[in-house]
Image (spheres, rainbow, N blue to C red):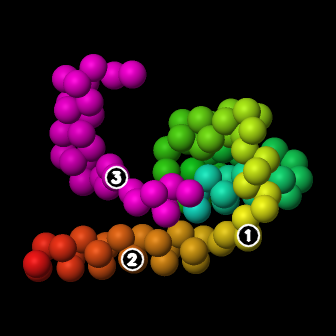
Amino acid sequence: MPSPEASRRNIRIARAANRRTFRSWQESKIIQLYIWQAYQDGGTPKQQVLADRLGVDQSWVSRVSRRMSQGMNELCSNPRVTLEDLRNAERFRIASSLLNQNI
């Protein structure tokens, strides 16, 4: 786990690069499900291609992929997700944050 100073430095770097550093739990879950589905649909997808398609870092795809071998098979009971589901979750998060700013 990074030190508090390293965490603050990473957040400053990400904000300076104009990158979104935080996503909602719904977005994270959809991304995890999408990665899991890509592996279940046969073959081994290229992690960089998945990362680019989902708008995340390749290291995050790698981390989720490693976790799959540690018991992510319970996800198979969930409905299939699409990139459109991810876009809807992003729109919901943005709309919620705008509403909270106006309150």
Figure quadrant of residue 7: top left
Disc 1 + disc 2, Cβ < 8 Å: no
Q: Earlier in the sequence, mark 1 or mark 2?
A: 1
Query: CA gap, disc 2 to disc 3?
Result: 14 Å
Indicate left or right for 41 with 5 as reference.
right
Q: Along the line of sight, which residue is nearer the eye, 100 or 63?
A: 100
Residue 45 visible in the current orientation = no
Residue at screen point 51% across, 55% down: 28
| In magenta stretch: residue 16 | yes
* 3 or 1: tag closer to the N-terminus: 3
Report the amino acid beneath label 2: Phe
Q: Which residue is mark 3?
A: 22
Q: Position of residue 35 (x, y in %)?
A: 68, 53
Say whether residue 44 is visible: yes
Q: Residues within 10 Å of mark 1 (few under 14, many from 20)?
A: few
Give the residue pinned by disc 1. Answer: 80
Other-residue count near label 2 (Cα within 10 Å), few / some / many at <14 / 14–19 / ≥20: some
Q: Secondary structure at mark 3?
A: loop
Residue 32: percent from the left, percent from the top?
Answer: 61, 53
Q: CA distance from mark 3 to mark 1?
A: 24 Å
Q: Is residue 65 left or right of residue 8?
A: right
Q: Answer above or below: position of 98 versus 58.
A: below
Q: Which mark is residue 28?
A: none
Range drawn in magenta: 1-29
